[in-house]
Amino acid sequence: MLAGLRRLEYRGYDSAGIAVVDGGAVDFRKKAGKIANLAADLEANPLPVSSTAIGHTRWATHGPPTDANSHPHVVKRAAVVHNGIIENFAVLRAGLEKEGEQFLSETDSEVAAHLLERELSSGSNLVQAMRDVVSQLEGAFTLVAVDAQDPDRIVAARRNSPLVVGVGDGEYFLASDVAAFIEHTRDAIELGQDQVVELTPEGVHVTGFDGSPAKTRDFHIDWDLAAAEKQGYDWFMRKEIFEQPKAVSDTLLGRLNERGELMLDELHISPEVLRRVNKIVIVACGTAFYAGLVAKYAIEHWTRIPCEVELASEFRYRDPIIDPMTLVVTISQSGETADTLMAIRHAREQQAKVIAICNTNGATIPRESDAVIYTHAGPEIGVASTKGFTTQVVACYLLGLYLAQVRGMKYGDEIGAILTELDAMPAHMQWVLDNRQPVLDLAEELKDAPSVLFLGRHVGYPVALEGALKLKELAYIHAEGFAAGELKHGPIALVSKGLPMFVVVPPPGRDQLRDKVISNIAEVRARGARTIVLAEAGDDDARANADTFLELPKVSTLLQPLVSTVPLQIFACELATLLGHDVDQPRNLAKSVTVE
Ligand code: M6R
């Protein structure tokens, strides 16, 4: 159980707990802080041996991370763990307190434990009790529960929050993510929305909230335990940065048919429908949103279809104009981001077709979309997204090229030439990784900088935003990304003597664009900024304006983000390490944001 929780710790690391069923009672331990605190407590006060257990790692929503607010919540014979937010918990809690129930925590989750215990005490079995409880709840939840008087059964329910089943040899698992049980089995069952699942020694039984027979999908996990381990690296993030050449190469693999045409096998939307599309809206959050911003430049250029990029958390609240001819492309590494999921539901209600770009088989977002293109990055465990970003850019590019192909906007040889360039990217990324020493030196030099700015233009602009996000989330220092041309409209006032400014310079192929960026570097340098210039090797004009010059391989403008992002990832990882921060689990964050 502890090993499983450790593999899920990246999803939330405020507190953790375990409950087991033993001899007609529930016994449990729970502790604020990282799982190491729980492990130490278990060492000192071991739990009894049991074959039925539930556990939880928390990312606090209601109530700070304390022992009492940790899960499981145990009320007499019932123990419950919960992910998500129970939106009507205040009303439910007030009602229960009025009837004499004593609450021990400030969480929304504890109401579920009280409600479940009441149902069990009034004679319901665990499955029926769970159905009755979920019928009273509003919001997002995965609930997993045990009953002290029914020791061979675990029951769970899910709505808008992840849950998968692992099918082992004589053993079954439930988890928010397959990483929890990958050590024991690679066979899994994807559950649908509003389903109740029951695990007993006899097997797995899934029904709808109303008891009706349920549809599920079996799948095999295409990575193994080794992929979910650090393999000698100090951080998952560092390992994942170094995995990028392979992740990009795997995402490109097997995309051509025998006639040399681009094929996207998972894309179950007919070419006729794709030919009718008159607008593309890309919806995502955080780093995935920046991947979308990069993709817009390529997709519009290749397909001539207008493409908007929108933050998922804003999308449905502004009543966006979408109709059956709109193609909505959602990007999500985890496939569970609540904001993105809600955007998908909104888009589908308006009859738009939705394609998900996702890294996680069995996740909710691909299941609720019309089609999916999987990135084949393997598990991304560091909270900061790295190989997630580069493979998302590649998958978006494949989609853009496919649209150009089916709509006749590009000839086969033109598409082939871009695919050949894409195939060369893993080697270019490897070159950047092998030549990282100047970036490591820079991190050492800048570790006391209170603020760092990032500039870029065209596809370099989202790269600048991504560089700033990485630094904020890992090093906790002020960092901002700007469109280089926008600087003179206000932000240049921030520039003072010695301020470190990273500038991403486009390749010389786009002469005007590059020249303008070089002028922007000169402007900030004239005002005292310390310029760190990322530009193609041999770009002497860029070098002449650089206090530090970081060489990039020679690639075309649209593909440059695949190499220019890598030094920025390394810089943030290194700087945060030097500052003594937990790079894989930065403060206040969680990997998979399953609340809106
Ligand atoms: O799993 P998703 O791709 O949907 O996650 C989206 C964002 O939460 C994620 O990219 C976040 O911004 C990362 N921590 C950035 O490194």
Image (tube, grey):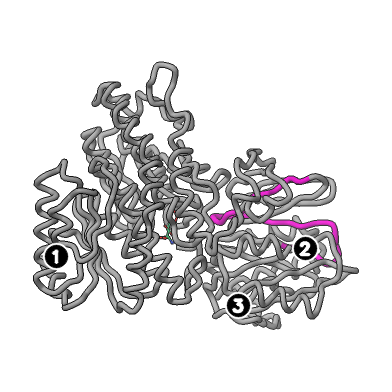
Q: Position of residue 218 (x, y in %)?
A: 66, 38
At mark 2, the secondary structure is strand
Q: Position of residue 460 (x, y in %)?
A: 24, 53
Q: Is residue 491 left or right of residue 220?
A: left
Q: Residue at x 62, y 63 (%)?
A: 136
Residue marked by disc 3 = 33
Q: Is residue 97 above or below residue 11?
A: below
Residue 312 appears in view: no
CB atoms at circles 1 and 3 under 8 Å apart? Answer: no
Mark 1 residue CB less than 8 A from any atom of ligand 1: no
Question: In front: mark 2 or mark 1?
Answer: 1
Tell me if residue 147 is in the magenta stretch. yes
Residue 489 appears in view: yes
At mark 3, the secondary structure is loop
User: Which range is magenta?
Assistant: 145-168
Q: Is residue 227 above or below residue 44?
A: above
At mark 1, the secondary structure is helix
Residue marked by disc 1 = 487
Q: Amino acid at mark 3?
A: Gly
Tell me the CA gap for discs 1 and 3.
42 Å
Earlier in the chain: of badge 2 and badge 3, it is 3
Residue marked by disc 2 = 53
Which residue is nearer to you in this view: 361 or 183? Answer: 183
Tell me the CA gap for discs 2 and 1.
56 Å
Mark 3 residue CB less than 8 A from any atom of ligand 1: no
Q: Amino acid at mark 1?
A: Leu
Q: Residue at x 57, y 74 (%)?
A: 14
